[in-house]
Amino acid sequence: MVGQWQGGGDVDIWHVEEAPADPGERSDRCEEYREEADTTSGSVEIVYAANPQAAAEQARQQARATSERIHRETRRP
């Protein structure tokens, strides 16, 4: 899945693709995405799901959880 976290549980999803079955090819693909993200001050999160819709929902759940964690951490004295 390729997209951008907008904050909270809001994720703008641009592209969803099935991971390559070959472990070497999968690793290479992840590395390519990580390199692209590094050049744009982004990050890469891997989402495992049964289908594109489940992947999108899981990404939104992870985004909400991350947002809540950041909010809690910034409010600590």
Image (cartoon, rainbow, N blue to C red):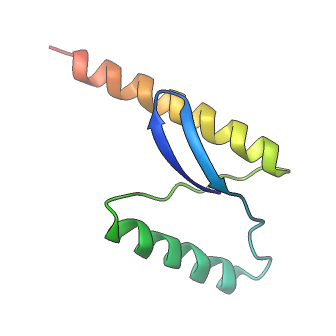
Quadrant assignment, res 69: top left
Q: Is residue 52 left or right of residue 15?
A: right
- What percent of the width, then of the height, locates residue 61? 61, 31
Taking the spot 54% from the left edge, 32% from the top edge, the residue there is 10
Q: Residue furthest right?
A: 50
- What percent of the width, then of the height, locates residue 29? 60, 78
Taking the spot 51% from the left edge, 28% from the top edge, the residue there is 65
Q: Is residue 39 above or below residue 13?
A: below
Q: Is residue 29 above or below residue 4?
A: below
Q: Is residue 62 left or right of residue 51?
A: left
- What percent of the width, then of the height, locates residue 37? 41, 66
The C terminus, quarter of image: top left
Instruction: Tally the marks.
Output: 0
- What percent of the width, then of the height, locates residue 1? 65, 57
Q: Is residue 6 above or below residue 29?
A: above
Taking the spot 33% from the left edge, 19% from the top edge, the residue there is 72
Taking the spot 65% from the left edge, 52% from the top edge, the residue there is 47
